[in-house]
Image (tube, grey):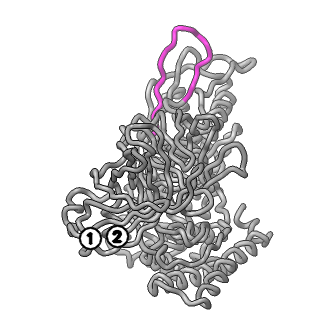
Amino acid sequence: MLFRSPFSIPYAPTLALVAVIWGGFHPKSFAQSPSAPLSQAQLDKLPKRLSLLNEMEFTQWLLGTEWEYESDGKVRTLWFVTPTCQIWTEEKGTSIQRSWGYTTTKGTALAYYEASERKGPRLVTINEDLQSATLDSIGKRLPMRLLGRRFPRPLEVSMTLPEFEEWMKARVLQSDNKVWLGEDGYLRWNSDKDKARYSFPAPGLVECEWNNRWNRSLVIVDPNMKTYRWFSGWGTDGGKIESTKRSSPATVATVQGAGPVAIRKRLSSVGGLLVVPLGNSRYAGKTSKLSITALKMEKNDPAIIGFNQEVGEDMSKALKEVCKYQTLRHDGWPRGHKMEIFFEDKYSPKDGPSAAVACALLVESLVLNVELDPGFSVTGDLNADGSVQPIGGVIAKLRGAAKGGQKIAAIPQKNRTSALDLAVGEGATPFVGLQLFSVDTFDEALALARKDRAPALAEALTAFDAVSARIRSSPGLLGTPAIREALGGVVTAAPNHVSARLLLAMAEGRLPGQFSASGSLDAVDQAVATIREATDTDLSATSSLDSGKLSASRNRLQRLRGKVDNRVQPYVDAWITWASLADQMISRRSAPPQVIEQFKAAISRISAEAKKLEGNSEFMEEVLR
């Protein structure tokens, strides 16, 4: 079950090939730039004179300030909305407003605008008192005064930045054209040729860069999250915000020759393993409860089933497959009821097929009056024949289950390699407290999920609890004959007990030393997630990259190198070289020509090594297996 919209994480990780637009090296562009406004308490601590501020403090101080000046008999305003985008009003009190990108040095803010008959730079120079300034524009020097500090009104629903990103990607901006945000980082309308790179300065804001750092526009989402205003160099626009995909309750028709199926239970719940986005293509796992209710309807029509919130297309399709399976399994379908599935967290976007097994368990619980174990969680797609299919994000989900204190969990059998990769990377810890199973069919999942488990399975669970308690109290016992024998007994009683199998492999020294092909790519992708964008854009305009992120990613890559598949190591080396050169350039704040050439070559090498892996049919077959 994926909390990710509108697209789910793919089962097999893909190589993120880098496309670089090189526009020259500007050392200042690597300076860390604030992405969020300072609080009043932080502002109060800043010096009150320009000469006492350093460059970073000045950039932080400038954010949110609004200025007023007079030109050609009109009072105009200039508002620094984000660290890189300003809004200028043609006349105070009117709706004619435009936006441009800007850059700062200590005491100045420079923007370049191009609109109708006016062309040229606009330079704001802040005076020592931080209350007045001078605007140089089209040959004029105009005095300015500080009106105060303001920010776009916050959203009525509290959202983190990653949550807003995912919410926004599942919607379109309606005006004369439909505009949407692509997963590749580009805003699009009309055609793929009409696109601009977007970013999220804060919840409620979308900033778009067209062809250079100056040519920026800004979308400000209204607090009700139903409408927006768009500011650009051409003027303003606005309209409604609507979903890109709408889902209606999944329904099934009466199956020919099949009789009605009784509903014996009105409410049931089961745990689900899910992922939540963290931004920068990273995600974390957690557990969440899914529940189902069955409400009687007056008519004796075939029951309908659906979610109580909007979900993506993949999740809707998965639920329809669940309906097919349940109809075939029971030779019929419930009548006269409305079954509604709801999530513990009902405000986050949902998509992906990995909630299918959980949904099928919920329906089964209502039909057979089966009590499900609240300590059990599951993830997996389901076909109409009852076979459990692989899904994505398994490693993150298992981390979330283990850290969340989950007792029993199940993943698709075809995802067992992900569990092995987690063991290679993190050792025994995730599996000592979590009883992880693999399931190949729905019946196997049901056998684990129900409270009244078969005696042999219940005994295996109890035996593993006893073994894991001994290992937690003394990790050194893992390799002892007694623990090996106990783990072997659990595996014999429950062959699909993944935790027992992995711990036994560790105890006997049989655990592989390297990740699988798929796990290697996933590990590298997660290691470079926070710095990848710097190779996807013109580095001269990069403001988010800093030495701390580079060092963290480089260190993580160096630790990973010996654990990834040998065929992936050149790809890792290319990233390490790139990060080292970038860190060197940041530290020096300048770069000689030879370093710049080495930097370009490192970027090209990343792309070349990725293409080699994509072109290796044997390797890609292992990834997709």
Q: Residue at x 57, y 39 (%)?
A: 173
Q: Residue at x 58, y 35 (%)?
A: 174
Foreground of the two, 588 or 368: 588
Q: Secondary structure at mark 1?
A: helix
Residue 202 x/y as whole percent: 41, 52
Residue type, mark 2 in image: Gly
- Magenta-colored stretch includes residue 101: no
Specify the segment rendered in magenta. Answer: 290-306
The answer to which quarter of the image holds residue 522 is bottom right
Residue 271 shows in the view: no
Q: Which mark is residue 50?
A: 1
Residue 221 x/y as whole percent: 45, 41
Foreground of the two, 216 or 609: 216
Residue carrying label 2 = 107
Q: Which mark is residue 304?
A: none
Residue type, mark 1 in image: Leu
